Image (tube, rainbow, N blue to C red):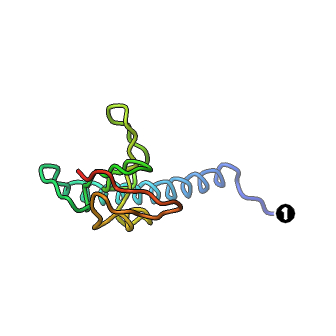
Amino acid sequence: MSETKSTAGDKHETGRAMLQLEREKLGKQLLEIEKLQEILSKLDSSTSSKTIGFGSIVHTTQANYFIVISAGILKVNSKMYYAISSTTPIGLLLMGKQKGDIITFKEEFTILEVL
């Protein structure tokens, strides 16, 4: 004779374990969203600076960037913007730069405008 577990019991335990994993995953996602929300709440769009910093919109000969959080591509008034964090490789290169500065990231490009 061989001992076997109840199939229903196995399914129940598996289901509970899967629910627990899903809860943990959703909890991590919620924490990430709360962090992003906190970062975005610090954004002050009423001020403008000639130097690139958090919240800057940067037009270059290569692309347009919005230095805030990594959120992919944004399309505004038919213009494409890369929403990037200041801690990304390109973000680190742009931070503190000004109009006319030349940046090299894979290729050379010039900062045309900082808003």
Give the side of residue 112 with respect to residue 12, left or right: left
Please report the residue visible at 38 percent of the width from the left and 68 percent of the height from the top.
92
Q: 108 and 94: which one is in front?
A: 108
Q: Local crowd at mark 1 within 10 Å, few (<14), some, or many (≥20)?
A: few
Q: Secondary structure at mark 1?
A: loop
Q: Position of residue 95 (x, y in %)?
A: 31, 66
Please report the residue visible at 59 percent of the width from the left and 51 percent of the height from the top.
12
Hey, which residue is sitting farthest front in the picture? 100
Q: Is residue 52 above or below residue 57?
A: below
Hey, which residue is sitting farthest left in the picture? 46
Quarter of image, res 73? top left
Q: Position of residue 14 (x, y in %)?
A: 61, 55
Q: How many marks?
A: 1
Q: Position of residue 55 (x, y in %)?
A: 25, 55
Give the side of residue 61 with respect to residue 13, left or right: left
Quadrant in the picture for the N terminus: bottom right
Q: Amino acid at mark 1?
A: Ser
Give the side of residue 7 with respect to residue 98, left or right: right
Q: Find disc 1 in the rendering and name its residue.
A: 2
Q: 12 and 68: which one is in front?
A: 68
Please report the residue visible at 64 percent of the width from the left and 53 percent of the height from the top.
9
Q: Is residue 67 above or below residue 80?
A: below
Q: Is residue 70 above or below residue 92?
A: above
Hey, which residue is sitting farthest right in the picture? 1
Please report the residue visible at 64 percent of the width from the left and 50 percent of the height from the top.
11
Quarter of image, res 44? bottom left
Q: Position of residue 76 (x, y in %)?
A: 33, 36
